[in-house]
């Protein structure tokens, strides 16, 4: 189910200035009934500045500012339902995943 993320022209120029070749969504949706929702993106880039790429992903790919560690230590239900993101280096660039907890 890989499909490329399409940005507005000004965001696309910003992505190119960061050395991002393309962003592809590799997973979107629930894996099971009443389960959490996952959004997984592969960010193809040769840029080693992970802070800049993460900032771009959090703002323009799929908005989420809470890390998994912050989610695990959530003190309120508000923090819990904000979900979390993970970000890691892979050979093609970076893997960015946002998880939104199920709520009925």
Image: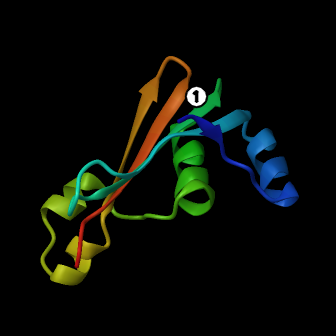
Left or right side of 12 for 90: left
Locate the C terminus and report the quarter of the image it occupies: bottom left
Q: How is the image coloured?
A: rainbow
Query: Residue 28, how many percent across, how many down?
Result: 45, 49
Query: Residue 78, how many percent across, how many down?
Result: 24, 82
Left or right side of 75 for 94: right
Left or right side of 22 for 38: left
Q: Which residue is pictured at 63% across the width and 29% down the height? A: 44
Q: Which residue is pictured at 52% across the width and 48% down the height? A: 54
Q: Is residue 26 above or below residue 63?
A: above
Front-most of 39 and 20? Answer: 39
Q: Which residue is pictured at 56% across the width and 21% down the height? A: 92
Looking at this rendering, what residue extends furthest in the top direction? Answer: 91
Left or right side of 60 for 28: left
What is the quadrant of residue 59 in the picture?
bottom right
Q: Which residue is pictured at 50% across the width and 17% down the height? A: 91
Query: Residue 6, how many percent across, how many down?
Result: 74, 50
Residue at image mark 1: 48
Query: Residue 16, how many percent across, how many down?
Result: 80, 40
What is the quadrant of residue 30 in the picture?
bottom left
Secondary structure at badge 1 equals: loop
Q: Specify few, some or many for label 1: CA neighbours under 10 Å numbering under 14, 14-19, or 20 or more.
A: few
């Amino acid at each position: 189910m890989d499909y490329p993320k399409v940005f507005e022209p000004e965001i696309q120029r910003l992505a190119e200035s960061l050395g991002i070749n393309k962003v592809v969504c590799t997973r979107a949706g629930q894996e099971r009934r009443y389960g959490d929702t996952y959004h997984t993106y592969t960010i193809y880039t040769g840029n080693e500045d992970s802070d800049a790429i993460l900032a771009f992903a959090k703002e323009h790919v799929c908005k989420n500012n809470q890390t998994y560690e912050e989610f695990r230590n959530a003190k309120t239900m508000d923090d819990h339902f904000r979900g979390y993101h993970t970000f890691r280096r892979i050979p093609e660039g970076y893997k960015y995943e946002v998880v939104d907890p199920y709520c009925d």
